[in-house]
Image (spheres, rainbow, N blue to C red):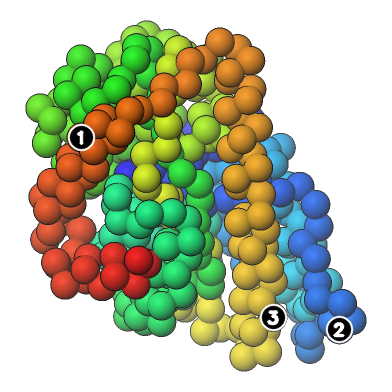
Amino acid sequence: MIRPVMRRTLPRSAFVFVLGTAFAAAVGAQVPAAPGTPPAPGTPAATERVLSVATLAPTGSTWMRGLNALNRELRRRTNNAISLRIYAGGVQGDESEVIRKMRQGRLDGAVLTGIGLGQIHRPTLAFMLPGMFRNQTGLDRARAALVGEVSQQFHTAGFELAAWGESGSPRLFSQREIRTPTDLRQVHPWVWREDVILPQMFEEEGASGVRLSLPEVLSALQTHRIDTVIAPPVATVALQWSAHFTHMSEGANSFGVGGFVFSRQAWDSLPAPQQAVTREVINQFQSLIGRNIARDDLAAISSMAGRGVTAVSYTEAERAQWAAMFTRMRARLVGVVSDAAWMDRVRTAGN
């Protein structure tokens, strides 16, 4: 799983969800409030608090429609006391720059991919390691068991983790059939510049990834500088990458995570009742991801199949080779992502 400064806006149809990929909502409808839920106490609209939030999601995308729905619900629930000013499409920079701006007080919050979360608290990446969990339920179980400790670490680092969750199951997309780990030696895969996971996987197999920032990926595919990407299907279609692939692997037994994060300074400036309702609305929004991401991935797979992308299904022997490589890869990441004890706790909590 997953950047020089991004100064230009991503294409309207683009959004990231790379193995480390992107936390964003695949929804386009209003976030539902609990039946009969009254607006929370808030100040009048004249003294409205506007929270600045950055995201890689582009204007006009389904993810931005979801964020806009969240914003409408937040306004409603707080009597217009709180609203979000959302900077879409990476206009505030890539996630490393966004986090730096939050530390400096120039942004209040951000919707971050797992890679961004890992820049705040590196051990969060343990939840994204290939082969860590047998299924999505395992990831959810581990997150629920360890959320208190993870949140405390964000707090200590100067941030508030308002919500976090899954972001899809990545697949391997390529311009040639890839069936075993050794096939990676024949391709030129993309690696997000600040990703610490995928480089270890490629190095384990004697392959070499090409480090690029997100906006560089599409042009790199067009010029054949890279020919392989690991990402959830829905992101591959949304980013306009899928037109450059002929093959798609089965699931890689890994799961992306991402989250909605505020700086502690911004979060602590909100009265306790407003903190409570803000967290509740954001978690309502997050819950929609789990109900929609699988659906959107299936739709993306169907769309690509309709355009002639070949789905590659592994034999049991080939799956065993991938599983063995993931085990070696996780061992290489001890001390890079976290210590062995934390990795063991994450794995045990989900299995």
Residue for badge 3: 277
Q: Nearer the viewer, mark 3 or mark 1?
A: 1
Q: Residue at x 61, y 30 (%)?
A: 300
What is the crowding at mark 1: few (fewer than 14 residues within 10 Å), some, or many (at least 20)? some
Q: How far across and down, in percent of the image, does residue 271 sit?
A: 63, 89
What is the crowding at mark 3: few (fewer than 14 residues within 10 Å), some, or many (at least 20)? some
Circle 1 SS class: helix
Specify the amino acid type for callout 3.
Val
Q: CA distance from mark 2 to mark 1?
A: 55 Å
What is the crowding at mark 2: few (fewer than 14 residues within 10 Å), some, or many (at least 20)? few
- In the visual, does 214 lie left or right of 15? left
Q: Quadrant of the C terminus?
A: bottom left
Specify the amino acid type for callout 1.
Gln
Circle 3 SS class: helix
Q: How far across and down, in percent of the image, does residue 73 sit?
A: 79, 67
Q: Quadrant of residue 172?
A: top left
Q: CA distance from mark 3 to mark 1?
A: 47 Å
Q: Residue at x 22, y 20 (%)?
A: 183
**Mark 2 vs 1, N-terminal side:** 2
Toward the viewer: 293 or 10? 293
Specify the amino acid type for callout 2.
Pro
Residue for badge 1: 321
Kindly check if marks 2 and 3 are in contact, taking CB atoms under 8 A apart as contact: no
Residue 38 is tagged as: 2
Toward the viewer: 253 or 315? 315
Q: Quadrant of residue 299?
A: top right
**Farthest residue, direction right:** 36
Q: Quadrant of the N terminus?
A: top left
Toward the viewer: 287 or 46? 287
Q: Is residue 96 visible?
A: no
Q: Nearer the viewer, mark 2 or mark 1?
A: 1
Q: How far across and down, in percent of the image, does residue 241 sit?
A: 49, 22
